[in-house]
Image: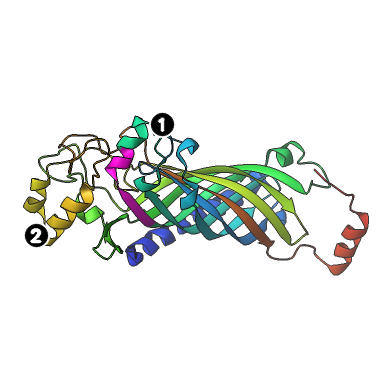
Amino acid sequence: MKPNLPLFIGKLLLLLGCCFTITSHSFSQAITFGDPDKTRWEIGFNFGPSFFLGDLGGNQGKGTAFVKDLNFEFTKLSKGIYVTMYPNTWLGFRAAANYTFLEGDDAVINTNGIDELHRKQRNLNFRSNVWEAYGAIEFFPLQFIGRNNEYPAKLRPYVFGGLGIFHFNPQGSLKGTNGNKTWYNLQPLRTEGQGMAEYPNSKEYKLTQMNIPVGAGIKYIISDRVNFSTEFHYRKTFTDNIDDVSKTYIDANNFIKYMSPQNASLATQLSDKTIPIIYPGMTRFAPGTLRGDTKDADTYFTIVAKIGIQLGTIYSSSGNRRAAKQTRCPAVY
């Protein structure tokens, strides 16, 4: 799946530019954030598992909004890069970009009761690439409390929050007579009547949207140059359409009014793939039947490992570096 890369890259560069503008402005306020001579820049990369939380898939019982409905078989790899400016030991300004892949499928639901049977009968699935960029502020509370300590601790917990932009493109599959799946972009098919006059409450959704990244981590200072972190990173989104499932089933006769015969046929098939589990002989849900959970937006989160490398000169001279090594006291917390 290929997103609209020129548009996305343009927005990504704009966001990163804003992040660095804000960062530079904050840095200029040296009286507030620290000594300009002590400012440090760090670059690094991160990788780790990503998890989707949406309408599709889930576990026993009714669907819920958080980790109870995680399907670990759809765990994917997230990877990314970042640049962070540290005006002092307790504050950082981060700009980052990540890529991951999300997936969900009603077919994996374990059936132990009627609640999950309704979702399994729905029989929908999706997959999507996700590209994102964001800016965030890091805060190290223990370093703030002990900011006058001449020998900062090596182990440093932190929290962060910011503003981001992400691009997704949900696809659904149809299985051919040979058993192979063919994947189709879902957004142009208006599977829930998005933008149709007959469904004024179903709005068309954009594939590039804003999110709010928040999280926490622990950084370990391996050396003056290298550090390692583990981080939990959650995204608050404002869309329920990452998996293209949000509201209700529509009358399939409306598809032909708004799209080509080929797309109308695809939309008819992909919008409702009912299998007759609860009601034998059933082929489609009645228009107006709930297709997804309208109360909660879709989201995703990652748990990543980060390797950071500090840029620039650490000590003003080799003599100062040797002296620092000889006089440094050990710090283990």
Q: Is 105 on the left-hand or right-hand side of 186?
A: right
Q: Nearer the viewer, residue 162 or 205?
A: 205
Q: Secondary structure at mark 1?
A: loop
| Residue that lies at the very extreme toward the right in this rendered image | 326
Q: Is residue 225 visible?
A: yes
Between disc 2 and disc 1, whose residue precedes? 1
Q: Is 220 on the left-hand or right-hand side of 185?
A: right
Residue pointed to by mark 1:
61
Residue at 68% over, 62% down: 309
Residue at 69% over, 42% down: 157
Q: Is residue 172 magenta?
A: no
Q: Which mark is residue 162?
A: none
Residue 183 image-quadrant placement: bottom left
**Coordinates of residue 287 in the picture (x, y in percent):** 15, 37
**Coordinates of residue 232 in the picture (x, y in percent):** 58, 45
Boundaries of the magenta span: 119-128
Residue 216 image-quadrant placement: top right
Q: Nearer the viewer, residue 116 or 100?
A: 116
Q: Which quarter of the image is occupied by the C terminus?
A: top right
Residue at 75% over, 41% down: 147
Residue pointed to by mark 2:
261
Residue at 69% over, 61% down: 310
Residue type highlighted by circle 2: Pro
Q: Is 265 on the left-hand or right-hand side of 293?
A: left
**Coordinates of residue 69 in the picture (x, y in percent):** 45, 38
Q: Nearer the viewer, residue 307 or 134?
A: 307
Q: Residues within 10 Å of mark 2 (few under 14, many from 20)?
A: few
Residue type highlighted by circle 1: Gly
